Image (cartoon, grey):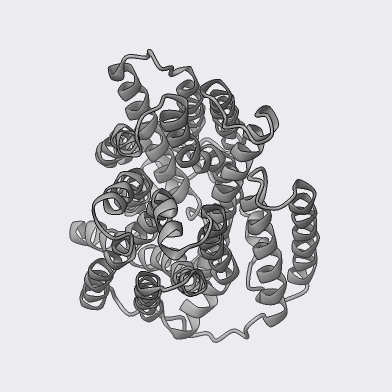
Amino acid sequence: MALRIRTVPLIVASALFMEHLDSTIIATALPVMADDLGVPTIALNLAITAYLISMAVFIPASGWMADRFGARRVFVSAIGVFMAGSILCGLAPSMTVLILGRLLQGLGGAMMVPVGRLVMLRTVPKDDLVAAMAWLTVPALIGPVIGPPLGGLIATYASWRWIFWINVPIGFAGIALALAFLPAIREEERTPFDTTGFLLSAVGLATGVFAFETLGRDIVPLPVSLALAGAAGLILWAYVRHARGFEQPIIDVGLLRIPTFRIAVTGGSLFRIGIGALPFLLPLQIQIGFGHSALESGLTTFIAAAAAMMMKFAAATIIERFGFRSTLIVNSALGGLMTASIALIGVGTPLGLMMVLLFVGGFFRSLNFTAINAIAYADIEPHQMSRATSLASMAQQISLSAGVAVAAMILHMVTAAGAEPDAGRISMALAAVGIASGLSALIFAQLRPGAGASLQGGRRAAAEPDGQA
């Protein structure tokens, strides 16, 4: 059993690490890539946006695909698709081919993330889920931390194409391990594909993600971004109306009636606004605000990865001792506070103090992710797992994009047109997103005292008999 708690999450994590690393590493190398391909850097931002849009479009279909064709088969195929997209990006002679490769990567990523989580949820017993989630969440935190310095190293000392080619050996290892150790899981019941729901969700989510990605970045005029956001809201509202009248909708919004799932999704989305903004704001602060190099910036923020690694040994004990409700309330407030406290870092701040703030913040954020990702599935029935993972993954993707959008919008509002934001203005954005993350504690306070007892083998349930969420 102990082997399963580690083996399954780590196999799934190999794919998640590849996806999270790739999504952050490219940002550092964009100027070099743009120069080599002969296009403006701002235009090459489409490579990032294309990937996010592709993920947003196909994530809702992942649950149905897993049920129809088998979770392991879809997971392994998704890694293969992601690798194919990576190879195409690495060979790209033009921006058009690069964007096609990124769209293919997004399709693979959309299946890898929720289906990989689904494999774990159906393989690991609920009372071992917290420990398993701790192993799973570490790569999601390490990837964005080591991505920028690794991207800087590759872009500086090798060809930028290696940014994509390094995914190939990782992908082959993930496929081999998945085929060797993951069980073949498949739902016997066949459900019809919600074509109307897929089209509505695809257009609505793609429009929304594009609006978030362009908001405050001067890629398109601000009124256009706001109009797109409004259109996305209307299309998604139309989807919700459709889903209420469809027996097996592709995104089952009815799952939000389950208190633990609803609170985990809404509270987790608010908390992730700060997390989504950090990889955007922190390099800006260290490089533009303080004048350090990209490599120095990446090495400084690497300390958060060490905290995430240490957390995995403590998460289960902390949650077991204090329960999900208390852990999430206190930890969300502290995590938001630590994010906001980065705004106090200045050019003259001792390096040791900066490291402490980043380390402690990384620990709290990692602990929160473990607790959120576990409590979300505490009261989900086995036949609901595939739709629950699709909905949770979709919310996560949107909230991370919204975090960058909020941060960019704040910088746009406080910075003069055409000027670079200085350290003071970046600090304002850091404080704002930190406060937003901390406010998620108010949502987690809605959990009942014994919420998540099923994830702890009934041990807390015996102590708190009235705590069913």
User: Can residue 377 be seen by looking at this rendering?
Assistant: yes
Horizontal placement of 111 versus 445: left or right? left
Instruction: Give the vertical position of 191 relative to 337 (above or below).
Output: below
What percent of the width, then of the height, locates residue 382? 48, 68
Instruction: Give the vertical position of 91 relative to 170 (above or below).
Output: below
Horizontal placement of 415 versus 421: left or right? right
Horizontal placement of 468 versus 186: left or right? right
User: Can residue 327 be seen by looking at this rendering?
Assistant: no
Say which residue appears at 45% left-offset and 33% top-offset.
282
What percent of the width, then of the height, locates residue 402? 61, 47
The image quarter containing residue 429 is top right
Residue 232 or 117: which is nearer the viewer? 232
Instruction: Give the vertical position of 131 relative to 194 (above or below).
Output: above
- Name the quadrant of the N terminus: bottom left
What percent of the width, then of the height, locates residue 183? 29, 76
The image quarter containing residue 200 is bottom right
The image quarter containing residue 433 is top right
Number of marks present in the image shown: 0
Say which residue appears at 30% left-offset and 66% top-offset.
167
Residue 321 or 385: which is nearer the viewer? 385
What percent of the width, then of the height, locates residue 415? 65, 29
Horizontal placement of 5 versus 268: left or right? left
Say which residue appears at 71% left-offset and 65% top-offset.
204
Residue 299 or 401: which is nearer the viewer? 299
